[in-house]
Image (spheres, helix red, strand yellow):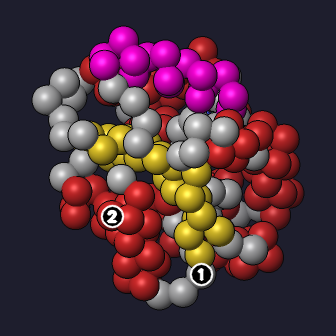
Amino acid sequence: MINLILFGKPGSGKGTQSEFVKGKYDLIHISTGDLFRNNILNNTDLGLLAKSYMEKGDLVPDEVTIKMLEAEVNKHSNANGFIFDGFPRTTVQAEILDQFLSTLKLSISMTIALEVDENLLIDRLINRGKDSGRADDQDRSKIQNRFEEYNNKTSPLINYYKNQNKFFEVNGVGDVNEISARIFKTIDNNI
Ligand code: ADP
């Protein structure tokens, strides 16, 4: 079983690359951002709560996010493995993910970080916002706030996974197929 975390700043290509990795290794793709956006579309209580945070570019509180993630994993008890996209984003989320997976006799195989310069990310996000209509992609101050959330709360996870020898960096700039080839190579060489 392969359980991967795709890691990186907003706009680094986690969602796009998750689809390639999911296809190649037959994994279940869980994107907490997509799950929140689906809840918002369906006007659920969870969606209503998440919306107020997401619109500002703030992280949704850990308790809510963790509960949603666990429910999603539990829906796929026959999975070959999982690809976690946008989760964990805080140390608490990472610790609880490890504990939760161990209750299922599972563990994280590796974390792959997509490396992209912030200036390039801002351009990518603004472009994505034009097509997707995502409010959090259309406003520079919200984008900046997401980077700050990443730098303050998510970047400590680099050391968390390095300490477990599970952290691998991949250059996230270039053609999408080129980047997925780099990811496949990293997985195949280190799994
Ligand atoms: P991006 O990586 O481009 O920011 P995502 O779809 O992963 O896009 O996330 C969008 C928003 O959803 C985040 O800014 C945050 O508000 C919320 N979110 C997603 N995943 C998490 C998480 N693990 N913890 C807290 N909030 C999250």
**Which residue type carries mark 1?**
Val
Helix, strand or loop at disc 1? loop
Q: Looking at the picture, tell me which residue is in the foreground, 123 or 153.
A: 153
Is residue 56 shown above or below 179? above
Q: Looking at the picture, tell me which residue is in the foreground, 186 or 101.
A: 186
Question: Which corner quadrant of the figure contains ligand 1?
Answer: top right
Q: Is residue 100 magenta?
A: yes
Taking the spot 36% from the left edge, 53% from the top edge, the residue there is 191
Dot 2: few (<14), some (14–19), or many (≥20) neighbours within 10 Å?
A: few
Stretch of the chain drawn in magenta: 90-105
Taking the spot 41% from the left edge, 42% from the top edge, the residue there is 109
Q: Indicate the position of residue 137 as horizontal and vertical percent values.
A: 66, 61
Disc sitting over residue 42 in the figure: none
Is residue 113 shown above or below 148? below
Disc 1: which residue: 173
Q: Which of the marked residues, 1 or 2, is nearer the chain's N terminus?
A: 1
Disc 2: which residue: 188
The image quadrant that residue 103 belongs to is: top left
Is residue 34 shown above or below 122? above
Taking the spot 59% from the left edge, 64% from the top edge, the residue there is 169
Residue 95 in view here: yes
Taking the spot 79% from the left edge, 76% from the top edge, the residue there is 119
Q: Is residue 42 magenta?
A: no
Helix, strand or loop at disc 2? helix
Quadrant showing the N terminus: top left
**Which residue type carries mark 2?**
Asp
Q: Is mark 1 within 8 Å of ligand 1?
A: no
Residue 31 in view here: no
SS majority, magenta: helix
The CA span between labels 1 and 2 is 20 Å
